[in-house]
Image (tube, rainbow, N blue to C red):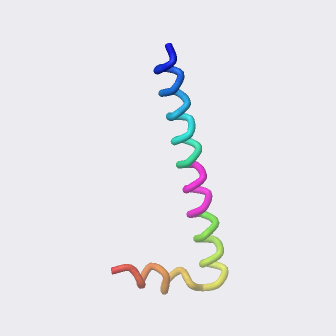
Amino acid sequence: NVHEVFMVTTEEIEKSEDEWHIFLNITLLRIMKKNGLRKNYFNSFP
């Protein structure tokens, strides 16, 4: 069934995107922590 294969592929892509976003967020936090920007960064949000 082509539809089932497509669904699985879509789920795999979404999963890898989530992992990529988590990786990006952690990397950003590490950089901000290192530069001491973390507090200012979060305070800039309304």
In which quadrant will I find the C terminus?
A: bottom left
Whether 29 is drawn above or below 43: the answer is above
Q: From the top left corner, tell me how far across and down residue 7 is, in percent.
A: 48, 27
Residue sitting at 58 percent across and 71 percent down? 29
The answer to whether residue 3 is above or below residue 42 is above
In-front residue for pair 1/35 = 1
As drawn, the residue found furthest toward the front would be 2
Q: Position of residue 10 (x, y in %)?
A: 51, 34
Q: Is residue 20 left or right of residue 42?
A: right
Q: Main secondary structure of the magenta part?
A: helix
Residue 25 percent location from the top left of the image: 56, 63
The residue stretch that appears in magenta: 19-25
Relative image position of residue 15 (x, y in whole percent): 54, 41
Q: Is residue 11 above or below residue 18?
A: above
Residue placed most toward the observer, 6 or 40: 6
- Considering only vertical position in the picture, is 29 above or below 2? below
Front residue of 18/35: it is: 18
Magenta span contains residue 23 = yes
Residue 6 forms part of the magenta stretch: no
Residue drawn at point x = 55 percent, y = 30 percent: 9
Residue 27's image quarter? bottom right
Judged from this view, the residue extending furthest toward the left is 46
Tell me how many marks there are: 0
